Image (cartoon, rainbow, N blue to C red):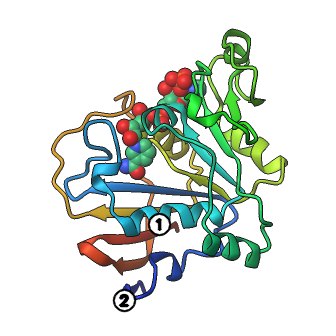
Amino acid sequence: MTAVHTVDAGRAVEDYGYRPAPPGVRANMIFSADGAAAFQGRAGPLSSPADQRLLLALRAYADVVLVGAGTARAESYGPVRLGPDHRDQRTELGLGVAPPPIAVVSQSGRLPESMFGPWPPPLLVTSTRGARQNRERRCDIITSGDDTVDIADAVAQLRARGMHRILCEGGPTLLDELVGADLIDELCVTLAPRLAGCQPLGRAVPTGIPSPAALRLAQVLIGPEDYLYLRYVRH
Ligand SMILES: NC(=O)c1ccc[n+]([C@@H]2O[C@H](COP(=O)([O-])OP(=O)(O)OC[C@H]3O[C@@H](n4cnc5c(N)ncnc54)[C@H](OP(=O)(O)O)[C@@H]3O)[C@@H](O)[C@H]2O)c1
């Protein structure tokens, strides 16, 4: 039976079934009601304060945040910063006080300057060719695949480093790679009450899977401002 709840006043979305994170790949994405993943190149116009808070909470429950370089550039990613309540939740989960690192998948090594500062640099996940060709030398580099990143191997390498709870924040290109490699264990979808029209994103190449993979709807949450929060798990 799928649990259906309305988020009570004074409670946050993350208080309903999001912690602990599953030991695998959890993806968190927002879509408009008509299926757009961004508006004019940013996810922010689709989002809401409760959704933003959920995004930060899911980071607190993860060992690593995995993101495509397209998103890191479009959204000017910085390091993960947790507020006191999410820090407390992280500590209660036994994940320590330090926020999780961000691992950026990139062939070009073109990461936004906003990711660098007086904090540990992000992990750069790139291919052997990428590591040879790109000039990014500030990051701890994980090489995977010869010409392009082999995402299954990259995930295995993160796990081998003790990062078992992997939170993928997109974008659509990276999500497609994870779907193609059958690596998604849980998908948290925020459905925004917005019509955004056609917003082409990513590389627009048809995915390689032979048929859509089935998911089970684990939870439906009706949140503030008519947002829906859906949590799907693999069968
Ligand atoms: N709705 C949502 O929840 C959500 C979430 C995230 C992002 N977004 C939106 O989505 C857009 C960005 O998405 P996107 O699909 O264009 O980009 P993306 O998935 O974030 O990143 C794509 C980039 O990742 C690198 N990459 C991915 N797979 C690779 C592989 N196998 N080998 C080597 N490099 C690989 C490449 O980086 P290089 O180019 O550096 O080589 C590639 O250009 C933005 O508009 C953002 O706002 C929406």
Q: Residue at x 45, y 41 (%)?
A: 171
Mark 2 residue type: Ala
Would you name the residue on which mark 1 appears? 53
Which residue is more in the foreground, 208 or 23?
23
Q: Residue at x 55, y 44 (%)?
A: 178
- Residue 3 in the image: x percent, y percent? 42, 86
- Residue 210 in the image: x percent, y percent? 43, 42
Outermost residue toward the front in this view: 118
Q: Quadrant of the N terminus?
A: bottom left
Q: Residues within 10 Å of mark 1 (few under 14, many from 20)?
A: some
- Residue 227 in the image: x percent, y percent? 29, 70
- Residue 107 in the image: x percent, y percent? 60, 21
Q: Residues within 10 Å of mark 2 (few under 14, many from 20)?
A: few
Would you name the residue on which mark 2 appears? 9
Which residue is more in the foreground, 169 or 230?
169
Q: Residue at x 33, y 58 (%)?
A: 47
Which residue is more in the foreground, 113 or 152?
113
